[in-house]
Image (cartoon, rainbow, N blue to C red):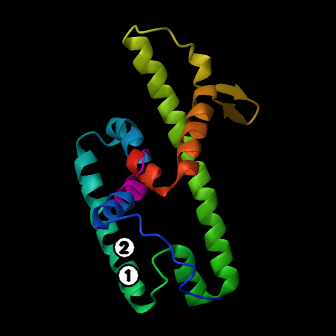
């Protein structure tokens, strides 16, 4: 193996890395849950988000410290793998994949509901509500949500730079 022959091309600059990290941490779930939380917590919403932000701030310190000590760290998998071994690293890695799949499904569902409501309220054209989600036994099928996931999957398949630009 010749290390000079196989070099990865640097795509991201410092600001793109920062924005990518912020978008991964916040995601669309934070924006879709604000309305629900406002109904429940009323005036305490601001304090709730302040507390969560405060806790996230201190959660970042152990990751930063560990990333300095172990150069390949910076991801939960590498932290678990190097700290507790291969089995725990394997379980954490696959749990992260399941979380990403679930969060993509939730984001697609919320975006499909937003699209239907936006187009229907703006009177551009009428989108049937069943396209945003149809109950089928134990799960929901969303045509618009599926199209959203396919759209972003194609963008991700195009490359890292294009995905970061859309992000």
Residue beneath the point at 37% across and 88% down: 68
Q: Position of residue 8 (x, y in %)?
A: 50, 73
Q: Is residue 38 above or below residue 134?
A: below
Residue at 58% in and 57% down: 99
Say whether residue 13 is left or right of residue 86. left
Q: Residue furthest bottom?
A: 69
Give the farthest residue toward the right.
Answer: 137
Residue 47 in sight:
yes
In the image, which residues are magenta? Answer: 22-28
Residue 76 coordinates in the image, percent (x, y): 52, 74
* Crowding near the residue tagged with mark 2, few <14, some 14–19, many ≥20 C-alpha atoms within 10 Å: few
Say which residue appears at 53% left-offset and 44% top-offset. 155
- Residue on which the image places disc 2: 59
Q: Position of residue 166 (x, y in %)?
A: 41, 45
Task: Label 2: state its secondary structure.
Answer: helix
The location of residue 34, given as percent across then percent down, is 35, 41
Q: Is residue 30 above or below residue 11?
A: above
Q: Which residue is mark 1?
A: 62
Residue 88: say if magenta.
Answer: no
Q: Are marks 2 and 1 in contact (CB under 8 Å)?
A: yes
Q: Secondary structure at mark 1?
A: helix
Location of residue 74 (image quadrant): bottom left
């Amino acid at each position: 193996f010749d290390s000079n022959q196989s070099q990865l091309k640097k795509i991201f600059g410092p600001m793109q890395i920062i924005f990518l990290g912020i978008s991964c941490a916040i995601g669309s779930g934070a924006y879709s849950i604000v309305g629900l939380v406002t109904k429940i917590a009323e005036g305490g919403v601001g304090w709730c988000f302040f507390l969560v932000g405060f806790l996230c701030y201190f959660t970042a310190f152990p990751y930063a410290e560990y990333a300095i000590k172990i150069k390949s760290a910076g991801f939960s998998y590498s932290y678990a793998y190097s700290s507790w071994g291969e089995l725990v690293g394997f379980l954490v890695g696959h749990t992260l994949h399941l979380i990403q799949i679930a969060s993509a499904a939730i984001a697609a569902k919320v975006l499909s509901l937003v699209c239907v409501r936006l187009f229907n309220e703006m009177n551009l054209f009428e989108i049937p509500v069943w396209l945003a989600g149809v109950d089928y036994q134990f799960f929901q099928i969303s045509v618009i949500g599926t199209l959203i996931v396919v759209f972003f999957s194609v963008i991700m398949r195009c490359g890292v730079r294009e995905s970061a630009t859309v992000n």
